[in-house]
Image: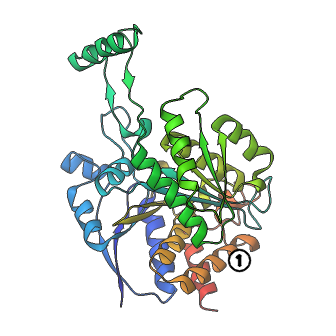
Amino acid sequence: MPHAVTLIPGDGTGPEITEATRRVLEATGVKFVWDVRRAGAEMLEKYGTVLPDDVIESIKRTKVGLKGPITTPVGRGQRSANVTLRKKLDLYANLRPAKTYPGLRSRYENIDLIIVRENTEDLYAGIEFQRGTREHEEILEAISRCSGHQLDPESALSVKYISVAATRRIVRFAFEYARANGRRKVTAVHKANIMRLSDGLFLATAHEVAKEFSDIQFEDRIVDNMCMQLVQKPELYDVLVLPNLYGDIISDLSAGLIGGLGVAPGANIGSQCAVFEPVHGSAPKYAGQNKVNPMAMMFSGVMMLRHLGEREAAHRLERALTQIIAEGKYVTYDLKPRPDDPTAVGTSQVADAVIERLHR
């Protein structure tokens, strides 16, 4: 049976890398029924939102989405498409692998990390109050009354909240992923030494959940120390589970350890739906130039194949991608020793090379 998948090309360079990824996924022999839905800057002008409702409805129907990057308008009051998808579909777990492959320019070898980021709470929930509004004044008065702190009335406010329920399910997700994939250890990352109530709740709940998984080692690290540890000795870590903001920062740091966002895949997973995407931006200045690296989205396609139960196809596609990277011949400029290397190939040529390798 073919797999129904919502395909969201995105904007900027998104359509190019999405098409390249669609081609290599079909070359694995797995059958798909693509429901193509438009989102991005063009939709903002047309419908007043970068993410029309029909995109959400399609993913609810297919249960699986493959998404290219979408530009977030700066300073226009628009929430990003990613945040909107996560909230409306309750995609509570952001899964970010960070793995080194031979041929990538990195200072490290043998990194194989899994970042599990809580997606729905923390500062990224978007609960903010603009200075000068009635709601802002009410919040300032409530803070003063309840805590004794007189905040500067010219301050804007963002609310950080962490709940037991959301923490429990993201930590359980991390442990269940570790168990299902033969991982040895889960590390909870926090700042409970300073934010004793919010991050303290995250840490305490993580310890409670860890008791249910005696076969998996558990530890915790303070987030600033975690950053240093990852730079100094990343080989000590395996699966990291973090609140939303720290997860965003650590996942990009981990991508830097392995060679950059050009090879960094991602997934947003909930109890009903999952959306797979590269984690880099839309790079609109390169749109239509057949220049950008499609491998992050292709590796996201590998994750999608595994999610769909197509493990053999996922293995073959990952192997083809890693062989192309190791050879270094049919790769885009960012994977060459020098970005001005004249032998660099374009987006579609990378897809051609991967497909040729799959057919060997």
The quadrant the N terminus occupies is: bottom left
Q: Mark 1 points at which residue?
A: 323
Image quadrant holding the C terminus, namely: bottom right
Q: Residue at x 58, y 56 (%)?
A: 211
Examine the rendering and report whether any part of residue 286 can be seen: no
Amino acid type at image mark 1:
Gln
Residue 248: % across, % down: 53, 45
Measuring from the top left, give residue 85's x and y in whole percent: 33, 54
Report the front residue among 89 and 100.
89
Foreground residue, 38 or 186? 186
Tag 1, which secondary structure? helix
- Relative to 273, is 332 on the left or the right? right
Compared with residue 139, is residue 272 higher up or lower down, i.e. above or below? below
Q: Does any portion of residue 204 appear in the rendered image?
A: yes
Position of residue 57 measured from the top left corner of the image (x, y, whole percent)? 22, 64
Quadrant in the rendering for residue 10: bottom left
Against 230, residue 179 (above or below) is below
- Give how far across and how far down residue 247 sits, in percent: 55, 46
Most foreground residue, 24 or 187: 187
Which residue is pictured at 36% across the width and 53% down the height?
Answer: 86
Q: In this view, does 181 lie above or below 39?
A: below
Q: Residues within 10 Å of mark 1 (few under 14, many from 20)?
A: some
